[in-house]
Image (cartoon, rainbow, N blue to C red):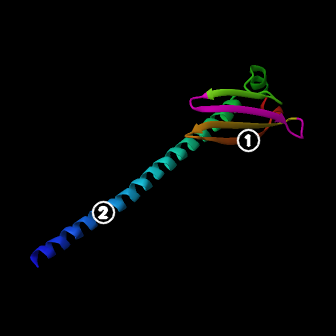
């Protein structure tokens, strides 16, 4: 009878180890998913900062200077690389002749997925010259 009880104790320990391993594997999977989401959030924040910095650079100069130096081309596209990000700045005249619609598109590769962030602003070109 004593040997039989020892067998049940061993079985209980093995079952507990199995359940613990199963729970640990599930938690490990959640941790990896959390890391991936954190990396995605960091990349999105960095892309938003790059787009905002591009618009702030344009605003720190007059629009005539921006256009003459090629920082922005109305009706055209200006592309540049900023670390892992590809930045494309487009501008088009609005319905009112002195309004310039500026879009900054930031693209980056995240694993196998291509991500992008776009920031847009409408600017009064005549009052900033």
**Disc 2 crowd, CA 10 A, few/some/many (<14, 14-19, 20+):** few
Residue at the farthest left position: 2
Q: Please, is residue 21 above or below residue 117 in the view? A: below
Residue 37 vs residue 3: left or right?
A: right
**Mark 1 or mark 2: whose residue is earlier in sequence:** 2
The numbered mark at residue 4 is none
- The image quadrant of residue 87 is top right
- Figure check: 24 above or below 76: below
Against 99, is 20 above or below? below
Q: Which quadrant holds residue 114?
A: top right
Q: Nearer the viewer, residue 125 or 117?
A: 117
Location of mark 1 (residue): 120
Residue 1 part of the magenta-drawn span: no
Q: Which residues are magenta?
A: 82-97
Residue 62 visible: no
Q: Residue at horizontal 63%, vertical 27%? A: 81
Q: Inspect the magenta stretch and tell me whether residue 86 lies in it.
A: yes
**Residue 68 seen in this snapshot:** yes
Image location of residue 63, percent across then percent down: 77, 28
User: Residue under circle 2?
Assistant: 18
Q: Quadrant of the N terminus?
A: bottom left
Is 12 positioned to the left or the right of 30 in the image? left
Where does the image place residue 82, in percent across and percent down from the top left?
60, 29
Element type at marker 1? strand
The mark total stands at 2
* Mark 1 Cα-neighbour bin, 10 Å: few <14, some 14–19, many ≥20: some
């Amino acid at each position: 009878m004593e040997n039989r009880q020892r067998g049940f104790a061993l079985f209980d320990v093995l079952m507990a180890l199995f359940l613990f391993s199963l729970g640990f594997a599930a938690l490990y999977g959640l941790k990896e998913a959390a890391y991936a989401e954190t990396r995605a959030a960091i990349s999105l924040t960095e892309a938003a900062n790059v787009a905002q910095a591009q618009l702030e650079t344009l605003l720190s100069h007059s629009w005539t200077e921006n256009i003459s130096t090629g920082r922005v081309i109305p009706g055209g596209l200006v592309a540049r690389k900023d670390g892992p990000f590809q930045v494309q700045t487009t501008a088009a005249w609005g319905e009112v002749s002195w309004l310039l619609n500026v879009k900054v598109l930031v693209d980056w590769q995240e694993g196998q997925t291509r991500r992008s962030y776009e920031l847009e602003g409408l600017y009064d070109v005549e009052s900033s010259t």
